[in-house]
């Protein structure tokens, strides 16, 4: 066999091998780009609780099933800011309409769209809002954030809001229902189809708390592990610590089971954050004031 022929064949084999390696490298890079995989399989988010108001002397029997009628407590009104993966996400949106101010007389009130300035944010910075349920104090502020897509359980929306935007159930405020109907008509509402659904990489929602028909809670992947934002599916640390149902639930057994599930989902019990407990800001004292970094 001529030497030149052998050299040529060796050169062809080298080129083919190098090409195969290059294809493998490019394919791997494309796969990582499409799936978000690489050094980290999913984003790690920063989570902050932002307290925009306090309601003083709230009846504890409205929070903890079986609590004495004479007990009361201050409750924190909060939204949660989740940042990472190129998004700024609110969990719940608070309230701002004047009728709620007159009825509930919140202390130290700052409009939620202004309270997030503590984190250097403007309303236009919010890309998404995950609404745990459609009660006024968690949903009323959704239209304060003009660029946000609103995520809500499909069953929650359809149980409470008619096709024309009126309310089906008295538990929901008519003005809030109309506002959500308008947001949906503008293409800004995404309806989530049930339990254990991923909303974004590293963020998943769960149902079963039964504060409302399809109230949801949210797990978030952070550098400290999985944080669970309970919202009204667990009002206070007392609900979680004693496994006592919230007072306002459609199914107490389901609510207690949901709290047990939250504790399993979280990387540590301290990373389950109740919806209205002022102790959140004592247990997570940094940076302080109206803001608590959950880590």
Image (cartoon, rainbow, N blue to C red):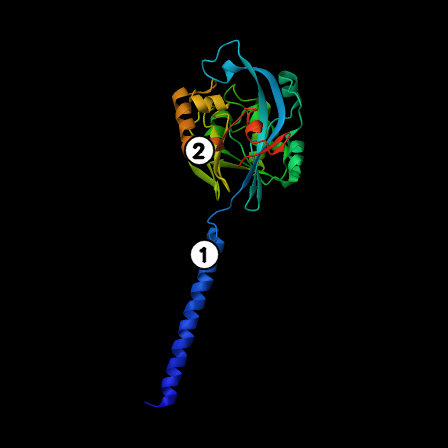
Q: Is residue 254 above or below residue 90?
A: above
Work out whether residue 113 or residue 290 is closer to the camera in this orientation and state it.
Answer: 290
- Identify the element where label 1 is drawn: helix
Q: Earlier in the sequence, mark 2 or mark 1?
A: 1
Mark 1: few/some/many CA within 10 Å (<14, 14-19, 20+): few
Residue 270 is situated, as x and y percent measured from the top left of the image, at: 48, 31
Q: Residue furthest bottom?
A: 2
Residue 234 is situated, as x and y percent measured from the top left of the image, at: 48, 25
Residue that appears at 56% across and 31% down? 284
Quadrant for residue 58, please give it.
top right
Residue 122 is situated, as x and y percent measured from the top left of the image, at: 67, 38
Residue that appears at 38% across and 77% down? 13
Mark 2: few/some/many CA within 10 Å (<14, 14-19, 20+): many
CA gap between label 2 and label 1 equals 28 Å
Residue that appears at 58% across and 24% down? 76
Q: Is residue 108 above or below residue 6?
A: above
Tell me, yes or no, if residue 178 can be seen here. no
Q: Which residue lies furthest to the left in this view?
A: 1
Question: Which residue has dot 2 on it?
Answer: 206
Q: Is residue 12 above or below residue 100?
A: below
Quadrant for residue 7, please give it.
bottom left
- Identify the element where label 2 is drawn: strand
Q: Is residue 59 above or below residue 220?
A: above
Q: Is residue 69 left or right of residue 56?
A: left
Residue 180 is situated, as x and y percent measured from the top left of the image, at: 57, 30
Question: Which residue has dot 1 on it?
Answer: 31
């Amino acid at each position: 066999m001529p030497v030149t022929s052998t050299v040529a064949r060796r050169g062809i084999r080298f080129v083919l091998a190098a090409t195969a390696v290059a294809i493998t490298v490019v394919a791997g890079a494309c796969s990582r780009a499409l799936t978000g995989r690489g050094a980290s399989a999913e984003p790690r988010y920063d989570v902050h609780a932002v307290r925009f108001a306090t309601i003083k002397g709230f009846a504890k029997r409205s929070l903890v099933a079986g609590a004495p009628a004479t007990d009361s407590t201050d409750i924190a009104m909060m939204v949660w800011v989740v940042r990472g993966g190129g998004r700024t996400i609110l969990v719940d949106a608070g309230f701002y309409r004047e009728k709620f101010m007159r009825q509930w007389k919140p202390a130290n009130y700052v409009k939620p769209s202004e309270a997030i300035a503590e984190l250097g944010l403007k309303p236009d910075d919010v890309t998404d809002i995950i609404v745990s349920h459609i009660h006024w104090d968690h949903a009323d502020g959704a239209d304060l954030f003009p660029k946000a897509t609103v995520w809500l359980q499909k069953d929650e929306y359809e149980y409470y809001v008619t096709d024309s935007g009126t309310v089906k159930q008295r538990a929901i405020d008519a003005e809030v229902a109309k506002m959500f109907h308008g947001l949906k008509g503008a293409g800004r509402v995404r309806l989530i189809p049930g339990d254990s659904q991923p909303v974004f990489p590293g963020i998943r929602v769960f149902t079963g708390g039964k504060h409302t028909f399809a109230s949801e809670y949210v797990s978030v992947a952070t550098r400290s592990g999985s944080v669970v934002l309970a919202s009204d599916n667990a009002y206070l640390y007392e609900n979680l610590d004693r496994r006592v149902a919230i007072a306002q639930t459609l199914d107490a057994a389901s609510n207690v089971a949901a709290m047990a599930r939250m504790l399993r989902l979280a990387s540590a019990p301290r990373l389950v954050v109740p919806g209205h407990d002022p102790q959140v800001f004592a247990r997570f004292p940094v940076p302080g004031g109206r803001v608590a970094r959950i880590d």
